[in-house]
Amino acid sequence: MIQALPPPPPAIIAPAPERSVGTVGQVRVAAAMTDARVMIDSSFRGASIVLYGAVFNPTDRPADVVVVVRGPDGPVRLVKKTRNMGFWLNSRPVLFEGAPGFYMTASTRPLSDIADFGQLRRLGVGVDHLRINAPQESRTVTRYGVRDVVVSRLGEDYLDYRRAVIRLREAAALYNTDPDGVEFVDAGLFRAEVELPAVAPTGQYFAEVWLFQDGEPVSVSNLTLTVEKVGIERDLYEFAHRRPWSYGVLVVLLAAFMGWAASRLFRRS
C-alpha cells in the first residue's frame, strides 16, 4: 500500500532588510580610512592612506565631497629680516600658538565652485580660511576717540606673517590643497589619498568629510588618525620631553665622550 507523503511546508520568505528610519530620504555621507594608525620608526619615509566612503543621495541634485585632514596644533616661531643701517638683522621673534602641524584639503572640484567665501570661512575649510591663532602679545591704544582699544602687536603685518606660516608649511609638504583629490570610482562611491610626509608631526589627526549640496553643508563624517613613534625613537622622544634636563645633560656628556674618543683615536694613528 502506497501512503501519500504530507505536502511540503510553505516557503519562508525572509523579510527585506529595513533601512534606518532616520536615513530614509536623507542626504548623507559615510567614510572610513584604510589605516587608523601610522607607526614612525627610523625607516619611515612617509605614508599614503586611502580615505573612502559613500554618498547617499536620494535626490536628483548633485553633491560635492570635501575632505579636510588636520594634524595636531603646535607653535610656529618666525623672524623677519629687516635692514638697519646697511645691515640685515632678524626682527623680534613672532610666535603663533595655534598653527596645525598638518593640513590637507581634497575635493571633487575647486572649493570656490562648491561653496561661497562666507560658508567656507565659517567652517574653516581651505588654507585661505585656516584658523591660526595670532600671537597673544597686544597693546592698548586710542582709536577714533575710543580709549583702551586692544590691538595685536603685529598690526597690519599679521597677514604677511600668516602667509609666511602657510608658505613654509606648503614647502615642507605639510599643507596641501588638491581641487581634484576626491574621485568617484562608482555611483556614490568615492576615494581620496592622504599623503603624510616624512616630517609629519606625531599626535592625533582629525579628518572631516563634508558633503555639500547647492553650496550648503548637508552632512559630515568625522574620523581620527593616530601618528606615533615606535621602537627606540619613541623611547628617546618620550624621555626628551618628560625629562628635558636629564636628556640635555646626557647629550652633552655623550658629545664630550665622542670628542675625547675621536681625539684619542686620531692621536694613535
Image (cartoon, rainbow, N blue to C red):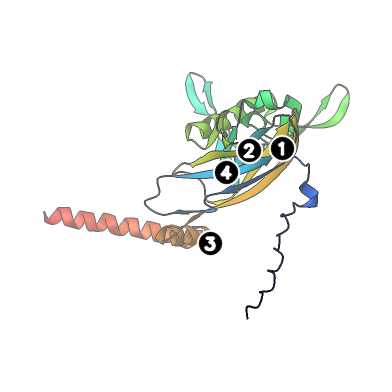
Q: CA distance from mark 4 to mark 2?
A: 11 Å
Tell us which disc is closer to us: 4 or 2.
2
Q: Closer to the N terminus: mark 4 or mark 1? A: 4
- Which residue is pictured at 50% across the width and 60% down the height? 238
Residue type, mark 1 in image: Asn
In primary-sequence order, the first of circles 1 and 2 is 1
* Residue occupied by mark 4: 52
Counting other residues with Cα less than 10 Å from the Cα at mark 3, is it few (<14), some (14-19), or many (20 or more)? few
Q: Amino acid at mark 4?
A: Tyr
Q: Are marks 1 and 2 in contact (CB under 8 Å)?
A: yes
Residue identified by numbered label 2: 188
Counting residues from the N terminus, which is met first, the one under dot 4 or under dot 3? 4
The x, y position of residue 27, in whole percent, is: 74, 39
Would you say 210 lies left or right of 257 here?
A: right
Q: CA distance from mark 4 to mark 3?
A: 38 Å
Q: Dot 3 lies on which element?
A: helix
Most extreme residue toward the bottom is: 1
Say which residue label 3 marks: 242
Question: Height in image: 70 above or below 146?
Answer: below
- C-alpha gap between disc 1 and disc 2: 8 Å
Q: Secondary structure at mark 1?
A: loop
Real-space CA distance between mark 3 and mark 1, rounded to the nearest whole angstrom: 50 Å
Q: Position of residue 76 (x, y in %)?
A: 57, 40
- The disc at residue 57 is 1
Earlier residue among tags 3 and 1: 1
* Mark 2 residue element: loop
